[in-house]
Image: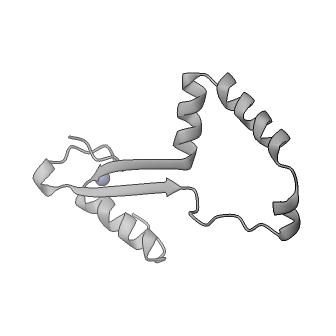
Amino acid sequence: MRCAGCGQEVAAWSSFVLCVELFAAPEAPSFSEEDLARDRRPELDELIDRLRAMGEAEIAAEEARVHERRVFRLCATCRERWHLALSGIPRPVI
Ligand SMILES: [Zn+2]
């Protein structure tokens, strides 16, 4: 297999796995009493119409925007680069 960072050949047993998840924040929006008292039916009808008009590819793209997970295999050198970057340590010049 090849390292996702540098493209160098790396054996599975000596590789490192990097998982990255990107997802929408789980917090719900807040609503005021005024928001709750307002008639939301027209907005909901419009939203439902938009969803019904979406194609498979458009739906998949929207789902990917909500949650995306990627898995990368890295060599030891690239693992160290990622470790330094995630630690906020400036990347050494190689
Ligand atoms: Zn590498």
**Near-viewer residue (21 or 66):** 66
Q: Is residue 52 left or right of residue 42?
A: left
Q: Is residue 5 left or right of residue 34?
A: left
Residue 17 vertical placement versus 88 (above, below): above
**Near-viewer residue (39 or 72):** 39
Residue 33 vertical placement versus 59 (above, below): below
Indicate how the structure is coloured in the image.
one colour
Residue 74: give x, y in percent of width and height.
28, 54
Report the residue at 24% width, 61% height from top: 76
Residue 29 vertical placement versus 6 (above, below): below
Q: Is residue 15 left or right of residue 84?
A: left
**Near-viewer residue (60 or 7):** 60
**Near-viewer residue (72 or 10):** 72
Report the residue at 67% width, 31% height from top: 51
Q: Quadrant of residue 9?
A: top left
Q: Please identify the quadrant where the C terminus is shown.
A: bottom left
Q: Tell me, yes or no, if residue 59 can be seen here.
A: yes
Q: Tell me, yes or no, if residue 92 can be seen here.
A: no
Residue 30: give x, y in percent of width and height.
73, 68
Q: Please identify the quadrant where the N terminus is shown.
A: top left
Report the residue at 26% width, 45% height from top: 8
Residue 27 vertical placement versus 67 (above, below): below
Q: Quadrant of residue 78?
A: bottom left
Label count reads 0
Report the residue at 66% width, 26% height from top: 52
Residue 92: give x, y in percent of width and height.
42, 70
